[in-house]
Image (cartoon, rainbow, N blue to C red):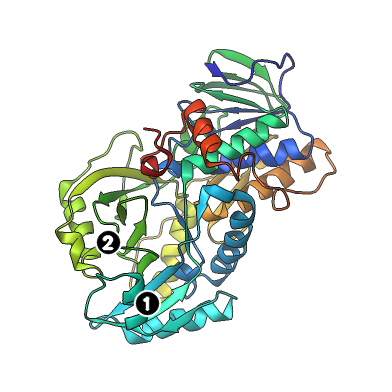
Amino acid sequence: MTATDTSHDEDPTVLVVGGGATGTGVARDLTMRGVSVVLAERGGLSAGATGRSHGVLHSGARYAEADRGGARECIEENAIVREIAGACVADTGGLFVSLADDDADYFAEKRDACRAVGIDAEEIDPAVARDAVPGLAEDVERVMRVPDGVVYPSRLVAATAADARERDARIETDAPLTDLTVEDGAVTRATVGGEELAVDAVVNAAGAWAGECAALAGVEVDMRPTAGVMVGVDHDGVGPVLNRARSPADGDIAVPHAGRTVLGTTSVAVDDPDGYERSEAAVERVVAECAEMVPGFLDAAVLDTYWGVRPLYAPAESRRDAVAAEETGTPTETGTGTGTGEARGISRDFTLLDHEVDGVAGFYSIVGGKLTTHRAMAAAVADRVCDRLGVDADCRTAEERLAAAGDPERLDRLVAEFDARSPADADVTGVE
């Protein structure tokens, strides 16, 4: 176990398992409320879905017509993250583009849905869009400007962890969780990195590995992880985030970075988040589809490819499939899922499970979600944990800037210190 702070002799009140945006966000939130925390990550921080995402700070436009509640939450969190995260974010703006063969009604529905939930969605002339993206395809017929941005995931996670540490959290990397002890209907002890800790609560923020973490407590969290590929190409002519204005599909987003553009993505169900096929055909498909928006992507050299695994919760996905089938009239096998616990649908996007109903009080799982909404997810968890611990303190994470937010050089030193190396933003941080 590599301890980034060894000054603590007392056992923690709360153990947070998982060092992505959500886990570090929970640690920060709880420490700001005066709760003692240890955060444990089996490798370096940001090693899971957070650090292997395309890094979009969503405005909510991507989801507006299908999930207005989730879209509204995105635009609210978009504004908060911009305010607190400083150099962890780039204010690129975003464009949704509709090509000649795309559904004009879909474009109009998305535009109207954005406006209905408070997303600033401005339809602009394609000629104006070409000033921002000189290589934009000639058959782009309609364009909508939205307040998307780019998150640098490793900086965000490192800054959030450092902020928690400054409030006396222990941040433990290379510290896998290997055992949980449940006594008299409550979690009481945990073993991380070979060290046994007495705990009053455990937060399972292990992402796609949440099922394995929950199994150590004797409860079941049924995950449905999906893998997706990101492709970094040698193309720096994209200023804003580009989205294809069509129903979500492979190769419908292009994200500007430092000297390259990251193209994404695919979505393939996998059984094992540690071992799955990485298809070259998927890489080629993403490039080809994105090239319909910017033909120059086809000729751009592929600089890197990386895969991420989304931590989707099976019962929530089954419900979503059922709703989609009902709306479209398409038959589907939804199943019931086997996830247990009291599911609190904080939004359609993520789920907080309180496992007291499974006989394990003080054990919580947070599953699903997006990088953009990580702070809100963390707040929901912290509220529940504080209720159990009898801590009367409000969430303040939206009110205070992250540690080192205004200092890019210090942020990148923190990335190296926490081993928060991420392929998503290595070209920005210089930490590989």
Q: Name which residue lies at 38% across and 81% down.
A: 107
Residue 153 vertical placement versus 74 (above, below): above
Q: Any mark on residue 328, and which?
A: 1
Which of the pair 125/248 is nearer the observer?
Answer: 125
Q: Any mark on residue 124, and which?
A: none
Type of residue at label 1?
Thr
Relative to 328, 122 lies left or right = right
Q: Please state the horizontal and vertical placement of residue 371, each as a whole percent of the image.
A: 50, 51
Disc on the earlier residue, 1 or 2: 2
Relative to 8, 231 lies left or right = left
Which of the pair 314/13 is nearer the observer?
Answer: 13
Sort mark 2 into few (<14), some (14-19) or many (20+) by Cα contacts within 10 Å.
many
Which of the pair 151/22 is nearer the observer?
Answer: 151
State which quarter of the image contains the C terminus.
Answer: top left
Residue 368 in view of the camera: no
Which of the pair 48/334 is nearer the observer?
Answer: 48
Q: Name which residue lies at 48% across and 53% down.
A: 315
- Mark 1 vs mark 2, foreground winner is 2
The quarter of the displayed image where residue 361 is located: top right
- Where disc 2 sits, the SS reads loop
- Where disc 1 sits, the SS reads helix
Relative to 162, 136 lies left or right = left
Spatial CA span between label 1 and label 2? 23 Å
Q: Name which residue lies at 68% across and 28% down.
A: 169
Q: Any mark on residue 251, and which?
A: 2
Type of residue at label 2?
Gly
User: Total label count?
Assistant: 2
The reply to whether discs 1 and 2 touch (Cβ–Cβ < 8 Å) is no
Residue 240 vertical placement versus 39 (above, below): below
Q: Please state the horizontal and vertical placement of residue 320, each as a whole percent of the image.
A: 45, 63
Q: Name which residue lies at 67% across and 47% down.
A: 401
